[in-house]
Image: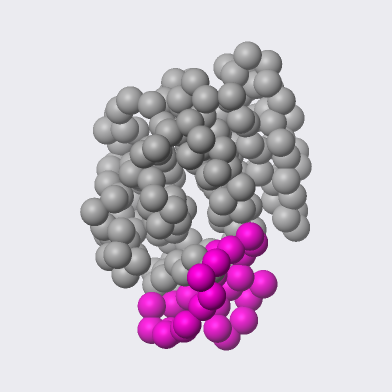
Amino acid sequence: MSSPSGIDVPPFWKIVPPWLERSEGTETRILRINPGAGFGTGTHETTQLCLGALAESWPRVLEKRRSPRVLDFGSGSGILSIAAAILGARVDGVEIDPLAIDNALDNAKLNGVEDRVVFSKDLSAAQGHYSIVIANILKPVLLEFAEALVSRLDPAGVLILSGLIEADVSPVSARYGSLLGGRKPQARALAEWRSLVWNRS
């Protein structure tokens, strides 16, 4: 829900511009994002779907890893990377647009997590395995990078995909499901947009 005081995203996120000073309850997680940059400010439904899936997955991830790593593929403004870092993850964000990377670094500093997030232009910079892999990007890119993303997912990890409309769900589910041993995703909808979440454990 958007308001002059920011955007509330269930279950506990609030996205606010950097100049807004607010005192929130202890359960609220504040994300300060510069709204003038145009690289993703949290208003889009796919971002909100990913934020919700990240929050819901986090307790399960902490049961498996004391220091989780998160990969954010197509990181844009860095909002999802920053959210994961606020929860306590070490995050690798991958983004091909250098201007978006600059904006993401600025946003990370606004949120005090610049020491927990690294942004790179190429997926090859993201090495090892990740407790959570997030990709909020269009279907052709999700299909092209399916093997590369799944190969970086922990054996007990969580995969969160969005940037999808209803017509995209079947081909993306089939492609990733085949790489994840036939597992079926949990699908969520917000307006015309969809997200898919696989729990590998």
**Quarter the C terminus occupies:** top right
State whether residue 107 is above or below residue 71: below
The residue range painted magenta reads 1-27
State whether residue 151 is above or below residue 31: above
Asked whether 128 or 139 is in front, the reply is 128
Which residue shows up at 66% across the image and 43% down it? 195
Queried whether the magenta region covers residue 110, the answer comes back as no
Rendered location of residue 88, percent (x, y)? 39, 50
Rendered location of residue 86, percent (x, y)? 40, 57
**Horizontal placement of 148 versus 100: left or right?**
right
What sort of colour scheme is used for the picture?
one colour
Asked whether the viewer can see residue 186, the reply is yes
Which residue shows up at 30% across the image and 54% down it? 101
Which residue shows up at 55% across the image and 67% down it? 27
Which residue shows up at 55% across the image and 33% down it? 158
**Quarter the N terminus occupies:** bottom right
Rendered location of residue 122, percent (x, y)? 30, 36
Rendered location of residue 61, percent (x, y)? 51, 37
Asked whether the viewer can see residue 171, the reply is no
Queried whether the magenta region covers residue 8, the answer comes back as yes
**Horizontal placement of 31 versus 136: left or right?**
left
**Horizontal placement of 133 versus 95: left or right?**
right
Main SS category, magenta section? loop
State whether residue 120 is above or below residue 113: above
Give the residue at the far left of this rendering.
115
